[in-house]
Amino acid sequence: MKYKLLKRFLIIRNFIRQKIDRKVIIFLFFLCISTFFWLLNALSKEYITNIHYPVRYSNFPKNKVLVGDLPVKLDIRVKAFGFTLLKYKIKPSLAPINLDLRSTTFYQSSNLHKTANYYILTRYERDKIDKQLSSEIQVIEISPDTIHFQFVNVIQKKIPVKANLNVAYEKQFMQNGKIIIEPDSIIIKGPQTILDTINYFKTKNEKFVNVSDTITENVELLTIKNVKTSKSKVKIIWPVEKFTETTIFIPIEISNLPDTLNMTIFPKKLKVSFLVALSNYEKVKEFMFKAFVDYSKINESLNDKLKIELIKYPDFISSIKQYPLNVEYIIEK
């Protein structure tokens, strides 16, 4: 008996559930249909709304450089059908509007404008902007209504180029001779306020390690905002050669010695050690060096010694060391 009652209960419950599920499905079906037609009707109407559009600027006036920032977006009030606006609203990013300044009328600001000396009225740019948007969109208003520009006159000058290389040589190798830069100077153009602070132009920093031969490299120049250069690269020839250490002995001369006195110094010769490129080794001669002690400084000397001054040596040697640094002396009348 209990089993029959339970079976009847389950049958009745399943029947009621099927009735309810069918009603829900029918309700949801008609809800979707009505929503679709409502959305269709809504999107077929015209609306007025704002679109935030990225903007880029091109063809600035010649011989002028822009300083300061410009708006990166325009707030454009438009009128269009809902279908058209929906396409713009759901786009992840919009292609920027190009504001071509070549045919734009610039107005000079009054002295009240401290951040700009020229401006344009965006309402006069409406046709340009309208052509870049869909034909289904009507531009009503553009904000900001005024865009300010601060221009400075462009000047030019010629300045030298300096190499900015970081060179690490292999053992016993060094720079030998003058660094050659081709061209050795360039023309730069830009605002006078910037160019007045530039006396030379550096190359980009490049590193060279274990160098054992002459470097010949095309190196890019550094870039400076609002400054244009006549060249973007220069050729650098950095002479490198093997060096050797050698020594030479040269006589020590005495200067400013009165005719009535004789002066004997110890030692009489100066030992000079230095590095020289192998190609210049045979060029080194004694007459290329000059060292002396100054009698007039005898009152400044300590412990009866005078300082040796090496005043002349070849420009193609380096790492010069001398011994001794001072001489002892005896003076006779």
Image (tube, rainbow, N blue to C red):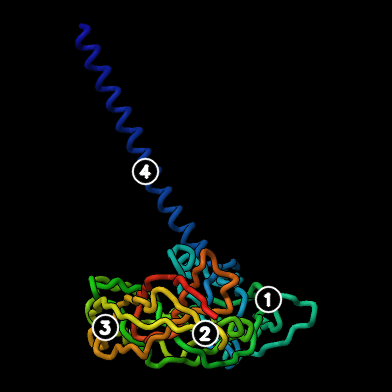
Above or below for 189 versus 298: below
Q: What element does badge 3 sit on?
A: strand
Closer to the camera in the image, 8 or 153: 153
Q: Residue at x 66, y 81 (%)?
A: 150
- Label 2 to label 4, Cα distance in Å? 121 Å
Q: Earlier in the sequence, mark 2 or mark 4?
A: 4
* Callout 3 amino acid: Ala
Crowd class of label 3 (few under 14; some 14 to 19; many from 20; radius 10 Å): many
* Callout 4 amino acid: Ile
Q: Residue at x 29, y 85 (%)?
A: 239
* Callout 2 amino acid: Ser
Does residue 91 appear left or right of residue 12 in this picture? right
The reply to whether callout 1 and callout 2 are in contact (CB within 8 Å) is no
- Residue under label 3, please give it: 277
The reply to whether callout 1 and callout 4 are in contact (CB within 8 Å) is no
Crowd class of label 4 (few under 14; some 14 to 19; many from 20; radius 10 Å): few
Q: Nearer the viewer, mark 1 or mark 2?
A: 2
Q: Earlier in the sequence, mark 3 or mark 2?
A: 2
Q: Nearer the viewer, mark 1 or mark 4?
A: 1
Residue 79 visible in rendering = no
Q: Nearer the viewer, mark 1 or mark 3?
A: 3
Residue 72 locus on image (x, y percent): 56, 71
Number of residue marks: 4
Crowd class of label 2 (few under 14; some 14 to 19; many from 20; radius 10 Å): few
Q: Residue 255: which numbered mark, if any? A: 2
Q: Residue at x 29, y 81 (%)?
A: 276
- Residue under label 1, please give it: 145
